[in-house]
C-alpha cells in the first residue's frame, strides 16, 4: 500500500474535506496548470462548474468560497480561516480576482461558478470542470477534477488509478488488506504502529514523521481549545447553537469521562461547521472522532506521552488507509458510513493499541467500530455539516472507545474480519440511493424541511 498516514490526516479548514478542501485544491491546481502551460497571462476569464453532490450542496458546504480561494492562490493548510470571509467578499464586490495572486481578471462569483444540482460527471459524483478563456472569448483550457473524499483530488489524467502519494518508492512492509497488515505485524514481531512507522520511512526520516504527527496532534488540541472558547450560533441559517463552551463550563475534573469525550467531539465539529482549522480524520465531516478519542487517552490513561500520540495516529492511519484503498471515505460516494464509520474504526484501533492490544485485538476493535456504523446515511439538513453531523461525531467517539474495550476483553478472534466489514460498507454504499449520499435530498434533510 502506498498511502501515507499524512494522506489521511491533513490540516485544512471546514466545513467539508470533499466539498471545501477538495474544491480549493482543485482550483489551485487549475491555476497552476495555466501557469505551467503558459496560458495564465493570456487568460481573461475563468469559469467553474460544480456537479453532483458539489452542485447540490455547494453553498452549504462552502464549495463556492473554496473555489474562489483556490483560484486566488490559497491552499487549505495555509489559508487563514479568519481572512476567508473578507477575501471572498472582496472578490464578490469588486468582480475581480487575482489568479494565483499574480494575474488579475474580471470575475463574477455568481455567474462564473455554476452549480448543477441534477447533473454529474461520469467518474465521480464530486466532479468539477474549470475553463479558461482569452480576451476574444476563445477557450484556452478545460480541465476536470474530482474530489474523491478526505481532501483527495484527482484530475482527468488520474482517473485510471487511486489517489496515492506521489512518491512510488516501495515501502518496507506493504499491505493492502487488514489480513496482510496482520501478517506484516507477525513477520516483524511488532505492533501495527511499528509496521506503519517503518513504511513511512520510505518517504522521510523517522524523526520527521514523528514531528509531523505531533504537529497534527497539536492542531487537534488547538481546535478543541478554540471550540471550547467560542460560543454563539453557527453560520448557514439553521441557527444551530454552539454547545461546547457551555458544556465545558459545567464540567468538573471528576465528570464522567464520556462527558469529556462528548465535549471534545462537539468542540471540533463546531469549529469545522464554522469554517475553522481542523484536521481531516479522515474527513472534515468526521473530524471530531479521532481527536476526541485521542484526547480521552491523553486525559484518562495512566501513561500518555508524545510516543503514545504518535502510535495512536500511526495505527489509526493504517486503518483509514484500508478504507480509502478498498472502499471509500467519501460521504457522497457511500454515505456517512464512509466518513463517521471509518473514523470510528480508526479511533477504536488507535485506542486499542494504546491499551496494550495485540495486532489481532486492534484489528478486532477496528472491525467493531465500522460494523456498528454500516448503512449510516449522509443526509445533512440544509446541506450544512451541522445536523446530524456534529452530534454524530460525539456518539461515534464513544462507540470507538467501547469497541476498543470490547476487543481487549477478547483474544482477537472474531467471526467478521475488518476486510469483510469494509467490503460490506462498500457494497452497502453502492446499493444506497443517491438521496442519502450528501445531496441533502433525502432523510432528515428532506423531512425536516417538509415539517
Image (tube, rainbow, N blue to C red):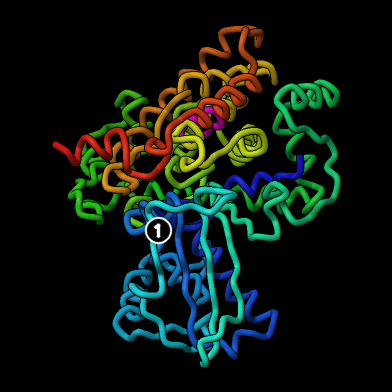
* 289 relative to 198 in the view: left or right: left
Q: Is residue 358 above or below residue 106?
A: above
In this picture, is 132 found above or below 364?
Answer: below
Query: Which residue is at 39% across, 35% downward?
Result: 436
Residue 126, magenta (yes or no)? no
Q: Is residue 222 visible?
A: no
The quadrant in which residue 424 appears is: top right
Residue 366 locus on image (x, y percent): 58, 23
The percent position of residue 433, horizontal first and vertical second, equals 42, 33
Q: Residue at coordinates 63% horizontally, 79% vertically from top-left?
A: 34
Residue 5 lies, with reference to residue 78, above or below; the image says: above
Q: Quadrant of residue 360?
A: top right
Among the 4 quarters of the image, the one containing residue 179: top right
Quarter of the picture containing the C terminus is: top left
State the residue position of label 1: 116
Q: Quadrant where the N terminus lies?
A: top right
Q: Position of residue 217 (x, y in %)?
A: 53, 46
Q: Which residues are magenta?
A: 340-346
Which secondary structure, mark 1?
Answer: loop
Residue drawn at point x = 78 percent, y = 52 percent? 203
Say few, some or many: other residues with alpha carbon within 10 Å of mark 1 (under 14 / 14 to 19 / 20 or more).
some
Q: Is residue 345 rendered magenta in the image?
A: yes
Amino acid at each position: 500500500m502506498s498511502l501515507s498516514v499524512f494522506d489521511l490526516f491533513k490540516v485544512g479548514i471546514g466545513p467539508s474535506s470533499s466539498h471545501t478542501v477538495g474544491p480549493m485544491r482543485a482550483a489551485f491546481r487549475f491555476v497552476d496548470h495555466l501557469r505551467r502551460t503558459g496560458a495564465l497571462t493570456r487568460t481573461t476569464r475563468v469559469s467553474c462548474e460544480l456537479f453532483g453532490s458539489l452542485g447540490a450542496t455547494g453553498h452549504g458546504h462552502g464549495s463556492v468560497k473554496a473555489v474562489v480561494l483556490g483560484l486566488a492562490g490559497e491552499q487549505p493548510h495555509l489559508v487563514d480561516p479568519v481572512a476567508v470571509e473578507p477575501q471572498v467578499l472582496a472578490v464578490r464586490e469588486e468582480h475581480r480576482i487575482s489568479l494565483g495572486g499574480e494575474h488579475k481578471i474580471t470575475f463574477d462569483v455568481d455567474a462564473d461558478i455554476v452549480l448543477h444540482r441534477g447533473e454529474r460527471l461520469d467518474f465521480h459524483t464530486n466532479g468539477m470542470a474549470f475553463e479558461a478563456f482569452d480576451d476574444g472569448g476563445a477557450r484556452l483550457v478545460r480541465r476536470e477534477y474530482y474530489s474523491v473524499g478526505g481532501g483527495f483530488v484527482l484530475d482527468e489524467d488520474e482517473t485510471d488509478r487511486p489517489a496515492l502519494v506521489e512518491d512510488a518508492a516501495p515501502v518496507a512492509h506493504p499491505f493492502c488488506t487488514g489480513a496482510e497488515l496482520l501478517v506484516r505485524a507477525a513477520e516483524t514481531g511488532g505492533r501495527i504502529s511499528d509496521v506503519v512507522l517503518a513504511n513511512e520511512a520510505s518517504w522521510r526520516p523517522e524523526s520527521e514523521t514523528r514531528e509531523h504527527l505531533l504537529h497534527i496532534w497539536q492542531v487537534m488540541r488547538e481546535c478543541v481549545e478554540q471550540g471550547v472558547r467560542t460560543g454563539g450560533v453557527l453560520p448557514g441559517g439553521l441557527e444551530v447553537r454552539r454547545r461546547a463552551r457551555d458544556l465545558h463550563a459545567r464540567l468538573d475534573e471528576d465528570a464522567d469521562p464520556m462527558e469529556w469525550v462528548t465535549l471534545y467531539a462537539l468542540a471540533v465539529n463546531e469549529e469545522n461547521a464554522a469554517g475553522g482549522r481542523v484536521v481531516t480524520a479522515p474527513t472534515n465531516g468526521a473530524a471530531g472522532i479521532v481527536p476526541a478519542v485521542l484526547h480521552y487517552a491523553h486525559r484518562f490513561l495512566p501513561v500518555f506521552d508524545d510516543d503514545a500520540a504518535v502510535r495512536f495516529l500511526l495505527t489509526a492511519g493504517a486503518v483509514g488507509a484500508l478504507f480509502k484503498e478498498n472502499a471509500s471515505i467519501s460521504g457522497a460516494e457511500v454515505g456517512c458510513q464512509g466518513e463517521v464509520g471509518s473514523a470510528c474504526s480508526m479511533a477504536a484501533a488507535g485506542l486499542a493499541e494504546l491499551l496494550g492490544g495485540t495486532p489481532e485485538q486492534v484489528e478486532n476493535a477496528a472491525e467493531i467500530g465500522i460494523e456498528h456504523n454500516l448503512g449510516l446515511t449522509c443526509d445533512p439538513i440544509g446541506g450544512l455539516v451541522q445536523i446530524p453531523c456534529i452530534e454524530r461525531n460525539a456518539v461515534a467517539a464513544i462507540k470507538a472507545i467501547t469497541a476498543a474495550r470490547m476487543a481487549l476483553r477478547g483474544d482477537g478472534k472474531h467471526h467478521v474480519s475488518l476486510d469483510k466489514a469494509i467490503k460490506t460498507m462498500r457494497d452497502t454504499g453502492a446499493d444506497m440511493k443517491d438521496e442519502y449520499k450528501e445531496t441533502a435530498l433525502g432523510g432528515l434533510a428532506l423531512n425536516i424541511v417538509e415539517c
